[in-house]
């Protein structure tokens, strides 16, 4: 009986719920508010008490709001102090960049890479004491073999001639480039006005004029800011046909001709895709279509500006080649080519077969790597769509060699090209010249804040905010663009001399060595595909799997594979793998 009574007594006692520790910060704010009010009542002339009332009232109100809101579970469970989590998350990129990441961590560019650009842009010494900071024993480390008899070159203004190469007998006027362009081997890659600020465009173009190199307009067309300083332009024509479109968005020959024959325009580049988001169109929202942007693109002010995922002027490889020829003719014979990020191999092979069938060849091709991209893109596209530059460049170069067209077509490339060794390595893989976008953005002062798509760029490079743009002083930044280009080519000159060569175009995969393991290194020429001239014109039995599998699927009359049904394609994929 006594035991039963004791149990009943214990069970009848009220349950004490402990005060949740996670509410401690909120409780302290309430207590602070009460204490501050008490001080105000006792000493109304004490100004510190009034400040305490205001501060703790705001914090208490914040806590009440946190408990009532339904958007963030963290704030409901941790009122007031939960905001600390969002603050730390907000400043995390900056804290990591300045205090945590090492000099060699690349996300996407390492501190060492960024520092090199800044030093060269400012004209500061870029030599490094005490040896390399790189781990030369790690797999993937590469170097260029030097010669015991280095050359001595007069200068670093390395150039290539684009267009004007010998054409087959009987070629008509549309197939002939009559205004070849002598281009630097290092140029500014495609970045549109709208993506970049007006001051950024002005500084880039002035720097290009000072250094005698080319400035790609991006698909946003030629703005008034591109014309101020008269730097050489590569006019990029995207699927929206900005600057050469009819009101319905279709291609306009008249408007194209008016722009293309401007002496400042040196080359015409058709954009099929870009490394940042290949196969993905884009929309510039109506509020961002300012009068300046509308004038450059030939679209209405305040209306959504749409870039379709594909072109409407052609739908097959053959039609595309005729479009290339037509643009070359309308431009007055200027070098005309296209830029793309490699996707389905059979589509690229179909373009090559169209060159063979029509006899029309572009004057140049720019290969964009999937690791490139100044434009904001969906994460899946940035991370998992498109071929990286090495694979795309190798396939394009070797395909043209294999069909005996390489001598008629120059190849440019773009994707994370920062240093002279980057340029040399791309040339070893088959490029004639390199473009850089983010490197020149850093020369303008970009700090890799990665807020390009927000309009809040801290350095005024990628914003249309007129106040933020004022931070970018055009004459100073133009000089830095010029310095970066000049210093990079000077470093390239020293590499070429050390290798015992006379021009960067002489660099081949035989000059680059790659570490495979702790005890094994190989020449790059032994690791990458190398097709012999004309090898694709005969049997493919001895060729790389990519040619044996996809070349038969390609057609000049369609971008679709020839093999019908999913089974044939699946078997083809398995063979290539």
Image: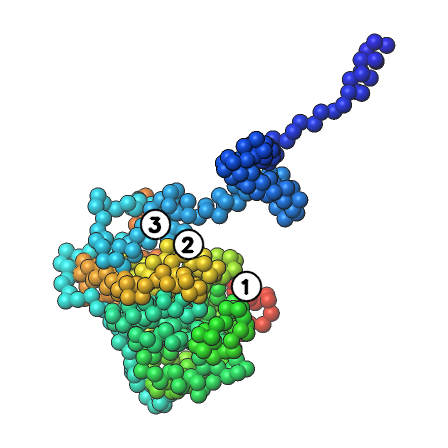
Mark toward the viewer: 3 or 1: 3
Whether 323 is drawn above or below 216: the answer is: below
- Asked if marks 3 and 1 touch (Cβ < 8 Å), the reply is no
Q: Secondary structure at mark 3?
A: helix
* Mark 1 closeness class: few <14, some 14–19, many ≥20 residues within 10 Å: few
Q: Residue at x 36, y 67 (%)?
A: 199
Q: Secondary structure at mark 1?
A: helix
Q: Is residue 394 visible?
A: no
Q: Residue at x 40, y 56 (%)?
A: 458
Q: Position of residue 561 (x, y in %)?
A: 53, 72
Mark toward the viewer: 1 or 2: 2
Distance from Cα at disc 2 to Cα at disc 3: 13 Å
Mark toward the viewer: 2 or 3: 2
User: Residue 110 versus residue 339: which sits nearer the camera?
Assistant: 110
* Residue ID for mark 3: 111
Which of the two discs, 2 and 3, labels the residue nearer the N terminus? 3
Res 571 label: 1
Which of the two discs, 1 and 2, labels the residue nearer the N terminus? 2
- Asked if marks 1 and 2 touch (Cβ < 8 Å), the reply is no
Which of the two discs, 3 and 1, labels the residue nearer the N terminus? 3
Res 449 label: 2
Q: Residue at x 47, y 75 (%)?
A: 291
């Amino acid at each position: 009986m006594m035991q039963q009574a004791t149990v009943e007594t214990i069970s009848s006692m009220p349950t004490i719920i402990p005060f949740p520790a996670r509410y401690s910060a909120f409780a302290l704010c309430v207590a602070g508010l009460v204490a501050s009010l008490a001080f105000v009542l006792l000493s109304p002339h004490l100004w510190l008490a009034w400040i305490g009332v205001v501060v703790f009232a705001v914090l208490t109100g914040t806590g009440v709001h946190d408990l009532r809101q339904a958007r963030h579970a963290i704030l409901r469970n941790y009122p007031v102090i939960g905001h600390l989590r969002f603050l730390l998350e907000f400043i995390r990129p900056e804290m990591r960049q300045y205090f945590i990441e090492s000099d060699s961590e690349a996300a996407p560019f390492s501190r060492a890479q960024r520092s090199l650009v800044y030093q060269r842009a400012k004209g500061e010494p870029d030599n490094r004491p005490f040896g390399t900071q790189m781990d030369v024993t790690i797999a993937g480390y590469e170097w260029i073999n030097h010669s015991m008899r280095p050359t001595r070159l007069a200068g670093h203004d390395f150039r290539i001639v684009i267009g004007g190469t010998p054409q087959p007998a009987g070629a008509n006027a549309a197939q002939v480039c009559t205004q070849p362009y002598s281009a630097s081997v290092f140029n500014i890659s495609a970045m549109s006005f709208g993506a970049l600020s007006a001051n950024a465009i002005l500084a880039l173009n002035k720097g290009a004029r000072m250094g005698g190199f080319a400035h790609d307009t991006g698909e946003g067309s030629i703005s008034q800011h591109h014309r101020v300083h008269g730097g050489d332009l590569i006019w990029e024509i995207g699927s929206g046909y900005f600057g050469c479109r009819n009101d319905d968005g279709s291609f306009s020959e008249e408007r194209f001709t008016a722009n293309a024959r401007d002496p400042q325009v040196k080359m015409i580049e058709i954009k099929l895709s870009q490394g940042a988001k290949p196969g993905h169109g884009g929309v510039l929202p109506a509020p961002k279509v300012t009068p300046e942007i509308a004038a450059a693109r030939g679209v209405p002010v305040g209306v959504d500006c749409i870039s379709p995922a594909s072109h409407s002027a052609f739908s097959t490889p053959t039609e595309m080649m005729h479009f290339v020829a037509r643009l070359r003719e309308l431009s007055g014979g200027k070098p005309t080519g296209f830029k793309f990020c490699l996707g389905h191999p059979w589509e690229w092979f179909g373009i090559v077969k169209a060159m063979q069938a029509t006899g029309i060849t572009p004057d140049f091709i720019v290969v964009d790597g999937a690791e490139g991209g100044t434009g904001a893109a969906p994460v899946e596209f940035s991370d998992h769509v498109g071929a990286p530059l090495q694979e795309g460049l190798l396939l394009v170069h070797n395909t043209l060699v294999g069909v005996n067209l390489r001598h008629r077509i120059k190849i440019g490339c773009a994707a994370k090209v920062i240093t002279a060794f980057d340029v040399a390595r791309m040339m070893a893989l088959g490029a004639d010249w390199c473009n850089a976008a983010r490197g020149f953005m850093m020369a303008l002062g970009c700090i890799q804040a990665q807020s390009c798509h927000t309009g809040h760029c801290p350095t005024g490079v990628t914003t249309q905010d007129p106040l933020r743009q004022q931070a970018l002083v055009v004459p100073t930044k133009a000089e830095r663009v010029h310095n970066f280009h000049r210093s990079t080519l000077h470093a390239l000159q020293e590499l070429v001399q050390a290798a015992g060569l006379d021009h960067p175009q002489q660099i081949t995969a035989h000059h680059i060595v790659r570490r495979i393991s702790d005890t094994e290194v190989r020449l790059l020429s032994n690791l990458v595909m190398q097709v012999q001239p004309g090898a694709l014109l005969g049997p493919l039995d001895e060729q790389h799997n990519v040619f044996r599998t996809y070349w038969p699927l390609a057609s000049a009359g369609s971008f679709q594979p020839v093999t019908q049904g999913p089974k044939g394609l699946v078997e083809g994929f398995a063979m290539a793998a």
